[in-house]
Amino acid sequence: MTTEQRYKAVIDWFEASMPVAETELHFDTTFHLLVAVILSAQCTDKRVNMITPPLFEAYPTPEAMAAATVDDIFEYIRSVSYPNNKARNLHAAARMIVDEFGGEVPSDMNSLLRIPGVGRKTANVMLAVAFDRQAMPVDTHVFRVSERLGLTDGSRTPLETERTLVSHIPADKLSKAHHWLILHGRYVCKARRPDCLNCGLKSACRYYSKS
Protein backbone atom coordinates (compact mmCIF):
# COMPACT_ATOMS: atom_id res chain seq x y z
CA MET A 1 0.00 0.00 0.00
CA THR A 2 1.44 3.38 -0.97
CA THR A 3 1.40 6.33 1.40
CA GLU A 4 -1.30 8.02 -0.67
CA GLN A 5 -3.45 4.88 -0.64
CA ARG A 6 -3.03 4.53 3.12
CA TYR A 7 -4.07 8.13 3.76
CA LYS A 8 -7.10 7.75 1.51
CA ALA A 9 -8.16 4.51 3.20
CA VAL A 10 -7.80 6.02 6.68
CA ILE A 11 -9.63 9.25 5.82
CA ASP A 12 -12.43 7.40 4.01
CA TRP A 13 -12.94 5.09 6.99
CA PHE A 14 -13.05 7.92 9.50
CA GLU A 15 -15.47 9.95 7.38
CA ALA A 16 -17.84 6.98 7.23
CA SER A 17 -17.39 5.81 10.82
CA MET A 18 -16.94 9.08 12.71
CA PRO A 19 -18.78 11.84 10.81
CA VAL A 20 -18.91 13.95 13.97
CA ALA A 21 -15.61 14.40 15.78
CA GLU A 22 -15.18 17.20 18.31
CA THR A 23 -13.23 18.07 21.43
CA GLU A 24 -14.39 16.34 24.60
CA LEU A 25 -13.40 19.31 26.75
CA HIS A 26 -16.32 21.31 28.14
CA PHE A 27 -16.20 25.09 27.75
CA ASP A 28 -18.47 28.06 27.16
CA THR A 29 -16.11 30.83 26.06
CA THR A 30 -12.87 31.10 24.14
CA PHE A 31 -11.03 31.97 27.34
CA HIS A 32 -12.44 28.95 29.13
CA LEU A 33 -11.37 26.71 26.26
CA LEU A 34 -7.84 28.06 26.62
CA VAL A 35 -7.94 27.35 30.36
CA ALA A 36 -9.22 23.83 29.77
CA VAL A 37 -6.59 23.05 27.14
CA ILE A 38 -3.79 24.32 29.40
CA LEU A 39 -5.14 22.13 32.20
CA SER A 40 -5.40 19.10 29.91
CA ALA A 41 -1.63 18.82 29.38
CA GLN A 42 -0.63 15.37 30.68
CA CYS A 43 -4.09 15.05 32.21
CA THR A 44 -7.31 13.43 31.01
CA ASP A 45 -10.17 15.47 29.59
CA LYS A 46 -12.43 13.64 32.05
CA ARG A 47 -10.49 14.99 35.01
CA VAL A 48 -10.38 18.50 33.53
CA ASN A 49 -14.14 18.47 32.95
CA MET A 50 -14.66 17.51 36.59
CA ILE A 51 -12.83 20.51 37.99
CA THR A 52 -13.62 23.28 35.49
CA PRO A 53 -17.29 24.08 36.35
CA PRO A 54 -16.46 25.72 39.72
CA LEU A 55 -13.28 27.21 38.26
CA PHE A 56 -15.22 28.80 35.38
CA GLU A 57 -17.88 30.05 37.77
CA ALA A 58 -15.28 31.69 39.97
CA TYR A 59 -13.36 33.16 37.02
CA PRO A 60 -15.74 33.85 34.13
CA THR A 61 -13.33 36.26 32.42
CA PRO A 62 -9.59 36.83 32.06
CA GLU A 63 -10.01 39.93 34.21
CA ALA A 64 -11.44 37.86 37.07
CA MET A 65 -8.64 35.32 36.91
CA ALA A 66 -5.99 38.02 36.61
CA ALA A 67 -7.34 39.61 39.80
CA ALA A 68 -7.04 36.34 41.72
CA THR A 69 -3.89 34.98 43.31
CA VAL A 70 -2.00 31.89 42.18
CA ASP A 71 -2.99 30.24 45.46
CA ASP A 72 -6.66 30.99 44.78
CA ILE A 73 -6.47 29.30 41.38
CA PHE A 74 -4.50 26.37 42.78
CA GLU A 75 -7.32 25.47 45.16
CA TYR A 76 -9.65 24.87 42.20
CA ILE A 77 -7.20 22.81 40.14
CA ARG A 78 -5.24 20.90 42.78
CA SER A 79 -6.44 17.49 41.50
CA VAL A 80 -5.00 17.90 37.98
CA SER A 81 -1.43 16.99 37.07
CA TYR A 82 1.21 19.62 37.88
CA PRO A 83 -1.24 21.99 39.61
CA ASN A 84 1.44 24.37 40.88
CA ASN A 85 2.83 25.07 37.43
CA LYS A 86 -0.60 25.25 35.86
CA ALA A 87 -1.90 27.68 38.49
CA ARG A 88 1.06 29.98 37.81
CA ASN A 89 0.58 29.69 34.06
CA LEU A 90 -3.17 30.34 34.22
CA HIS A 91 -2.65 33.44 36.32
CA ALA A 92 0.12 34.75 34.06
CA ALA A 93 -1.91 33.91 30.95
CA ALA A 94 -4.92 35.84 32.25
CA ARG A 95 -2.70 38.81 33.08
CA MET A 96 -1.17 38.84 29.60
CA ILE A 97 -4.56 38.53 27.89
CA VAL A 98 -5.83 41.50 29.91
CA ASP A 99 -2.71 43.64 29.69
CA GLU A 100 -1.61 42.95 26.11
CA PHE A 101 -4.63 41.66 24.22
CA GLY A 102 -7.48 43.77 25.55
CA GLY A 103 -9.10 40.90 27.41
CA GLU A 104 -9.54 38.78 24.27
CA VAL A 105 -7.69 35.56 23.50
CA PRO A 106 -5.62 36.27 20.37
CA SER A 107 -6.40 34.31 17.21
CA ASP A 108 -2.97 34.05 15.58
CA MET A 109 -0.26 31.47 16.23
CA ASN A 110 2.55 33.88 17.13
CA SER A 111 0.48 35.72 19.73
CA LEU A 112 -0.89 32.50 21.21
CA LEU A 113 2.62 31.13 21.63
CA ARG A 114 3.55 34.13 23.77
CA ILE A 115 0.95 33.20 26.38
CA PRO A 116 2.33 31.34 29.44
CA GLY A 117 1.40 27.66 29.36
CA VAL A 118 0.73 27.67 25.63
CA GLY A 119 2.89 25.53 23.36
CA ARG A 120 2.37 24.70 19.72
CA LYS A 121 -0.16 21.94 20.40
CA THR A 122 -2.31 24.19 22.59
CA ALA A 123 -2.07 27.04 20.08
CA ASN A 124 -3.17 24.71 17.28
CA VAL A 125 -6.10 23.48 19.37
CA MET A 126 -7.22 27.07 19.86
CA LEU A 127 -6.92 27.80 16.15
CA ALA A 128 -8.88 24.67 15.23
CA VAL A 129 -11.57 24.65 17.92
CA ALA A 130 -12.03 28.27 18.96
CA PHE A 131 -11.31 30.06 15.69
CA ASP A 132 -12.42 27.45 13.13
CA ARG A 133 -9.05 27.40 11.38
CA GLN A 134 -7.61 24.32 9.76
CA ALA A 135 -4.82 23.12 12.05
CA MET A 136 -3.26 19.86 13.19
CA PRO A 137 -2.51 19.80 16.92
CA VAL A 138 -0.30 16.82 17.78
CA ASP A 139 -0.67 15.30 21.23
CA THR A 140 0.50 11.87 22.39
CA HIS A 141 -2.52 10.16 20.80
CA VAL A 142 -2.05 11.78 17.40
CA PHE A 143 1.69 11.09 17.53
CA ARG A 144 1.21 7.41 18.43
CA VAL A 145 -1.72 6.61 16.14
CA SER A 146 -0.13 8.31 13.13
CA GLU A 147 3.01 6.24 13.55
CA ARG A 148 1.16 2.97 14.13
CA LEU A 149 -1.11 3.41 11.15
CA GLY A 150 1.81 4.36 8.94
CA LEU A 151 0.74 7.93 8.29
CA THR A 152 4.18 8.90 9.56
CA ASP A 153 7.39 6.89 9.31
CA GLY A 154 9.84 7.17 12.17
CA SER A 155 8.64 10.62 13.20
CA ARG A 156 10.79 11.91 16.03
CA THR A 157 8.93 15.01 17.21
CA PRO A 158 5.36 16.33 17.32
CA LEU A 159 6.34 19.06 14.87
CA GLU A 160 7.64 16.48 12.40
CA THR A 161 4.37 14.55 12.74
CA GLU A 162 2.36 17.74 12.26
CA ARG A 163 4.23 18.67 9.09
CA THR A 164 3.83 15.18 7.62
CA LEU A 165 0.09 15.05 8.34
CA VAL A 166 -0.46 18.57 6.99
CA SER A 167 1.34 17.63 3.77
CA HIS A 168 -0.95 14.64 3.12
CA ILE A 169 -4.37 15.42 4.61
CA PRO A 170 -6.63 17.75 2.58
CA ALA A 171 -6.62 21.22 4.16
CA ASP A 172 -10.37 21.25 4.71
CA LYS A 173 -10.14 18.03 6.78
CA LEU A 174 -7.16 18.82 8.99
CA SER A 175 -8.96 19.91 12.15
CA LYS A 176 -11.45 17.07 11.96
CA ALA A 177 -8.64 14.60 11.30
CA HIS A 178 -6.99 15.81 14.50
CA HIS A 179 -10.10 14.79 16.44
CA TRP A 180 -10.36 11.49 14.56
CA LEU A 181 -6.84 10.51 15.54
CA ILE A 182 -7.23 11.65 19.16
CA LEU A 183 -10.50 9.79 19.70
CA HIS A 184 -9.20 6.68 17.97
CA GLY A 185 -6.12 6.73 20.19
CA ARG A 186 -8.17 7.34 23.31
CA TYR A 187 -10.69 4.55 22.82
CA VAL A 188 -9.28 2.01 20.33
CA CYS A 189 -5.58 2.41 19.52
CA LYS A 190 -4.56 2.74 23.16
CA ALA A 191 -0.94 3.10 24.19
CA ARG A 192 -0.49 -0.17 26.05
CA ARG A 193 -3.20 -2.41 24.65
CA PRO A 194 -4.44 -1.35 21.22
CA ASP A 195 -7.77 -3.04 20.48
CA CYS A 196 -6.71 -4.23 17.04
CA LEU A 197 -9.37 -6.92 16.75
CA ASN A 198 -12.16 -4.35 17.01
CA CYS A 199 -10.44 -1.71 14.87
CA GLY A 200 -11.90 -0.93 11.47
CA LEU A 201 -8.54 0.28 10.21
CA LYS A 202 -6.75 -3.09 10.33
CA SER A 203 -6.50 -3.39 6.56
CA ALA A 204 -4.72 -0.02 6.31
CA CYS A 205 -2.63 -0.29 9.48
CA ARG A 206 1.12 -0.83 9.30
CA TYR A 207 1.31 -1.89 12.95
CA TYR A 208 -1.36 -4.59 12.54
CA SER A 209 0.18 -5.93 9.35
CA LYS A 210 3.45 -6.48 11.21
CA SER A 211 1.94 -7.98 14.36
Image (cartoon, rainbow, N blue to C red):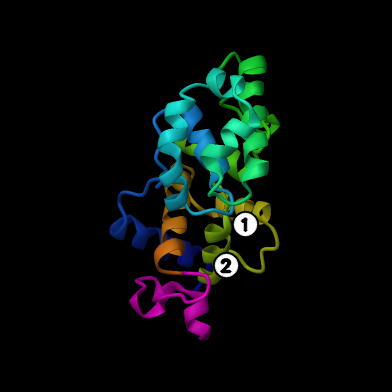
- Type of amino acid at the residue the image marks with label 1: Thr
| 107 with respect to 89 (left or right) | left
Q: Residue 202 sits in which quadrant?
A: bottom left
Q: Which residues are magenta?
A: 190-211
Element at badge 1?
helix
Q: Which mark is residue 79?
A: none
In the depicted view, which residue is nearer to us: 18 or 195?
195
Residue at x-position 47% and y-position 62%: 7
Q: Position of residue 112 (x, y in %)?
A: 63, 31
How many residues crowd around disc 1 within 10 Å: few (fewer than 14), some, or many (20 or more)? many
In the depicted view, which residue is nearer to us: 93 or 142?
93
Check the image and report above or below for 82 versus 147.
above
- Mark 2 = which residue? 147
- Tag 2 near tag 1, CB within 8 Å: yes
Q: Which mark is residue 161?
A: 1
Residue 194 painted magenta: yes
